[in-house]
Image (cartoon, coloured by chain):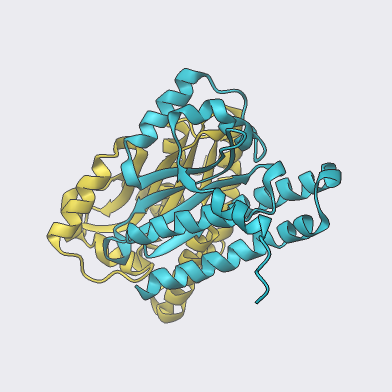
Chain colours: A yellow, B cyan
Amino acid sequence: MVPVPNNNSSSEEQKFQVRKLQISDKNKGFIELLRQLTICDSVSDKDFEDRFRELSALGDDHIVSVVEDESSGKIIATGSIFIEKKFLRNCGKVGHIEDVAVDSNARGLKLGKKIIAFLTEHAHLMGCYKLILLRQELEDFERAVNLSSMTDKSQMQEDIISGHKQFVKAIMEQIIHAEKNLEDT
Amino acid sequence: MVPVPNNNSSSEEQKFQVRKLQISDKNKGFIELLRQLTICDSVSDKDFEDRFRELSALGDDHIVSVVEDESSGKIIATGSIFIEKKFLRNCGKVGHIEDVAVDSNARGLKLGKKIIAFLTEHAHLMGCYKLILLRQELEDFERAVNLSSMTDKSQMQEDIISGHKQFVKAIMEQIIHAEKNLEDT
């Protein structure tokens, strides 16, 4: 039997693990990554630490997740979720996914999908009956991808670019699927 | 000079004040009101109190507002907002408006608009740069209005029905206006 060739892309996929944001991530390009998504001027260490502690105090009700490229020591993907507690749906909970960003140099590694999967699993563990990812977030992400594929074409293989143009669609399908799973459980 | 006739509708408007949810509102039809919006089986007193205390612990970061009809002692409108704290937009905040409901027998009093105005003002005081009201929330509300106007036609004046069919559009315009104001400040 012919051995399956070693697929560099999937070993890289396994390498990049999603973890929770740490206070030291500010110095690893976390803010610069958010800047690829929307306006985000430089944030002082104090403001960052204050916000970090405010969110930490919410425990599992607000998680900011990141992927670090350990070879470069840079944060290359992020996404957050907060759990909204309601009275309706018998005092149900809803997970809101926000601020999903993948570094323009790290596209094609399915990091966005990994982030979404991590946050979806969190929503599941928290007992959410519904998961919301705003269309606007998707549009911001899509715009960032399109922009980087226009300005950065030389560095990107064609399959990576086309793969990412399908990413937003895939996220949407994943969300619908995740919502279905949440309903079934 | 001819005295301005006493307009019953606007004196009713002044009568109904928006206030924060109280624990005693469970016995004033709060859950029954949510049931007009979506699935909400009966909630035990303990579950209600637990959720009430969880939300109260979040202080100004999560407000559930209601309008009580003091003559009947019933809760006839509600809407909530939670404040999401972000790192982007220089550690900015976003207000999320959720679960806006108006009792089907209390339409035409502009209570929905009042609720939205109250929550918008709260977002402003909390320093939010953006306000989000999910299209789905609007659609739920619109469906509830359409449904009640079909089943309840006998009780409703025509102008009330048509007024409410424009309500969703008006809310959307108000949100856009509120977002603009938040950006300007």
* Quadrant of residue B11 within the rendered picture: bottom right
> Which residue appears at 26% of the width and 57% of the height?
A75
Residue B28 rendering spot, x and y as whole percentages: 56, 29
Q: Is residue B5 above or below residue B111?
A: below
Residue B89 rendering spot, x and y as whole percentages: 32, 66
Residue A132 rendering spot, x and y as whole percentages: 52, 48
Can residue B76 be seen in the rendering of this structure?
yes
Count up the numbered dots: 0
Q: Nearer the viewer, residue B100 or A154?
A: B100
Residue A67 rendering spot, x and y as whole percentages: 31, 51
Q: Nearer the viewer, residue B114 or A121?
A: B114
Can residue A4 be seen in the rendering of this structure?
no
* Quadrant of residue A43 within the rendered picture: bottom left
Tell me the quadrant of the picture where the C terminus of chain A can be found: top right
Extreme residue in the front direction: B1
Q: With A19 as the anchor, is B94 left or right in this view? A: right
Q: Is residue B72 above or below residue B14?
A: above
